[in-house]
Every structure is written in structure tokens, then in C-alpha cells.
Image (spheres, helix red, strand yellow):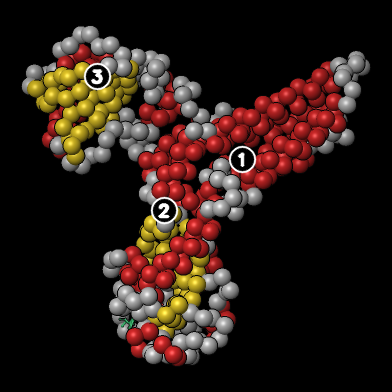
Amino acid sequence: MGSESTDTICALASGSGRAGIAVFRVSGPKALWILRRLTGRNEFEPRRVYHAEFSDPVSGEVVDDGLALYFSAPNSFTGEDVAEIHVHGGRAVIADMLSAVMAAGGVRLAEPGEFTRRAFAAGKMDLTAAEALADLVDAETTAQRRQARRQLSGALGDLCLEWRARLVRAIAYFEAEIDFSDEDLPGGLPARTAAEIGAIRGEIESRLADRQTGERIRDGLRVAIVGPPNAGKSTLLNCLAGRDAAIVSETAGTTRDVIEAHLDLGGYAVILADTAGIRATEDAVEAEGVRRAARTAEEADVRLVVLDGATWPEVPPDVAGAAAPDDIVVLNKCDLIDSGAIKGELDLSPLPVSALGGHGMDMVVAELTRRVSRLSGGGEAPVVTRARHRAALEKCVEALTRFDPEKSSELAAEDLRLAARSLGRVIGEIDVEDVLDVIFRDFCIGK
Ligand SMILES: Nc1nc2c(ncn2[C@@H]2O[C@H](COP(=O)(O)OP(=O)(O)OP(=O)(O)O)[C@@H](O)[C@H]2O)c(=O)[nH]1
Ligand SMILES: [Mg+2]
């Protein structure tokens, strides 16, 4: 983006549908000038709210009245001059207000994430915070919101800064050794530095040993519904999702593709996947479905095994054999069997349900929620919330593991510099341009 960053940009910052209020944000050197053109008012004190009529500067027609705010650089979200225009949130108001801003001239539409990118460029936030802002806007569950806010306030960013500051100190000691190896340095320095490097490495490793909880909360936990054909897997998915997401029929082998539904279980985002019934089949399409089912089951954080009450207590051996001890096993179609017949078969002790009538589903939801919160919660709040963070921290640990004070000082210092650079990458201070393009592309326009 480079030189374009002196452009003045504008976007609707609020949602584009019908709403009580719509907020436009204008950022850049022309922001105040545009506010003046639209309102006919000259004086705007920063950080005060003004009631104003906004007119199209070309036609002169009043589009709407509302609130005008001005934030002067550098005390704004982007660090630039920023104007905010609050009008009524009708579709025509939004469309005509945007044309009026454009008609004022010297302004263009913002690209996705461009406001945040400017805030980042102005040093208002580091890259982990910019990512967290995107996560906060995308958060669909309470756990996602909490995690995004923690990250926004520097959960990982501050740690990286601290680790890096300590590394930089260690590097300084090593370089002092390189430069002044003949002169007297405080005794015991290399040993103390090595201990400090070990300590930093241990801290980063303990943050990485988090069972990927942060990524799971952010992306949603994966729950796979698996079992023999016709057991009622799709019925169960529809029941949990509260809508007809998957086709249900009495023909065995109905589901082929993996069908996903998003749920909020106890504040955690869950991606529930319905899969093809597992059986040997001559049908090439169904066989592909069975392969996909196996892969989905393997990648899932939690498996919900559905058994068919209509054939109970017979369980296909490949299904019984595949059920792991920590799978949740459900016996569906319990309306077809009397409750006395459920207990005592295999080691599975299934939860009796009737997905068709919705009976026993509260038990399934409670058990699922228990598993999901156990996988997501407990222990220290995670600081690694994206694969990008993990990759950079792993690189850092690698360099610190290579570090060996017995090697030549030059080589040892180089390992430390590499480690420090990986930490700089997490917060976005090192070779960022390409990374930035990828990250900010995911933002919505107006952020
Ligand atoms: N009596 C009874 N029938 C059910 C129940 N749940 C599902 N069914 C019926 O069982 C049949 C199969 O249901 P599906 O949900 O399509 O089963 P599935 O496991 O997804 O089957 P495939 O996709 O073919 O593997 C349908 O006719 C459902 O109406 C239940 O709780 N009780
Ligand atoms: Mg199905």
C-alpha cells in the first residue's frame, strides 16, 4: 500500500443492513475538510459530538441529520485525522450518504482492513492485536469474544515483547564478549546468560504445550457424528442444529458428503459434522463418502458414535471396534426398544436417545458441552490463537535449542538473533508486508 497511505479513505463502519444507526468513518488528511463540506460547519473541536445536517456537496440536498465527530491526529484509531458520521441506518440513507462523502472529493473507498492496517502502521497496535480485532468482530461465542479481548489487550504481544527484550539483553552480553574478549567482563556472565536463555525457552515451550486450545476456541472444536448407515446420524445432526441441514431417509447410505453445522455449546464454538454411514460398499460414490467419514472422524476433537436401536443389541463389528474409550456413544431409536434392553451390552454403555422425537437429547448436549469445555478450558488461558503464532514461536524455540554457549560466540549470538527475529515476526515488526496482505485481506471493509 505504501504511498497510498496518505489517501483519505472512507467506509461504512457499521453493518450494511437496516439498523437504527449507521456509522461512516473517514480517515486521512482530508477528513476534517470533508466533514466541513458535508455539514457547512467550520469549527470542530476534537473528540466532541456535534449535531449536524449532512448535505450532498454537489446537489446541495440534505441527506440526513445525525452526529459528527472529529479526532485529530495522532489521537485517533488510525493515528490520522478521523471523522465519524452517524446517521440513521436505512439502506437509502447509507447509499446516499456514501455518495455524498464521495462527492466531497479527495476521498476513496477503504479496502478491507485498511483502517486497522493504518492503525498498525502508526504503531497504535501490534500485529497480534490487529488480528485480535478481526477475531473480535468475527466472534460468535462468548469464549471467542473473551479470547479476542485478551489478545487485544496484549496477552501474546506483551509476552513476545518481554521475551525479546530479555533475548536482546543476552545478545548484548554475547556481543560484548565477541568485541571485548581480551578485556575483563563481569565473571560468570556466559553461564548466567545460558541459564536465562534456557528460562526463556522453557516459558515459550510451556505456552506452546497448550493442546492448541487457543486455535480450537478461535476456529471451533470439531465434533464428528459417526456410525453405521441408517442409525439416525443425520437426524441427530438436524436435532442438535435445530434445522434440516442434512437429508434424512430410510435408505441406508443416504449421506455421502460431510455436512457441517455450527453450534454454540456453553459459549464454545463447535463445528458438528455429519458423515456417511460406515460400511463396505460397491458404490464408488458411497465409498468415497465412507473415506471422508473416516478422515473426519480422525481429525475430530470429539466423536459422537451413533448406534441403531432398530438392530440393537447387534453392533457392526467395525463400528464397535472403532469406538475409542473417550467417544460419546449414543443409542438412537430408543422408541423402538424397551429401556431394560439397553444396559449391559458391550462396554459401550450408550446414552439412550430418540433423535426423531428429540428424547434424551439434553443428555447428549450436556455430555458434549462437558467434553468441549474440558478440551477448551482449564489451566492457563491460551496465548497462541493462530497457526501463525505457533509457527513463529516454534522457530524461536528451535533457534534457542540450537543455541550453545560452548560454540563460538559469533554462532551463539546468531542463534539468539534468529530467535529474537521470530518473536518480532509474531508482533509484526519483521518482514511483514506479505504477511500483512494475507492477514488484512480477511478483515471486513470498514474495519
Ligand atoms: N423410530 C425412529 N426412527 C428414527 C430415529 N432417528 C432417525 N430415524 C429414522 O431412521 C432413518 C435413517 O435416519 P438418518 O438420519 O437418515 O440416518 P443416517 O444415520 O444419517 O443414515 P445414512 O446417512 O444413510 O448413514 C430415517 O427414516 C429416520 O426417520 C428415531 O429416533 N426413532
Ligand atoms: Mg445420514
Crowding at dot 2, Cα within 10 Å, few <14 / some 14-19 / many 20+, comes out as some
In front of the other: 419 or 284: 419
Residue drawn at (40%, 40%) of the image: 136
Residue 48 visible at all: yes
SS label for mark 1: helix
The answer to whether the residue labelled 1 contacts the one labelled 2, judged by CB atoms less than 8 Å apart, is no
- Residue 339 in the image, given as x and y percentages of width and height: 41, 87
Labels 1 and 2: the sequence-earlier one: 2
Q: Rounded to the nearest whole Å, what is the CA distance between mark 3 and mark 2?
A: 36 Å
- Which is more foreground, mark 3 or mark 1? 3
Q: Measured along the vertical axis of the image, is residue 348 above or below residue 378? A: below
Residue at label 3? Answer: 49
Q: Is residue 204 above or below residue 169?
A: below
Compared with 13, 309 (above or below) is below
The residue pinned by badge 2 equals 267
**Numbered badge on residue 392:** 1
Measured as percent of width and height from the top left, residue 113 is found at: 38, 33
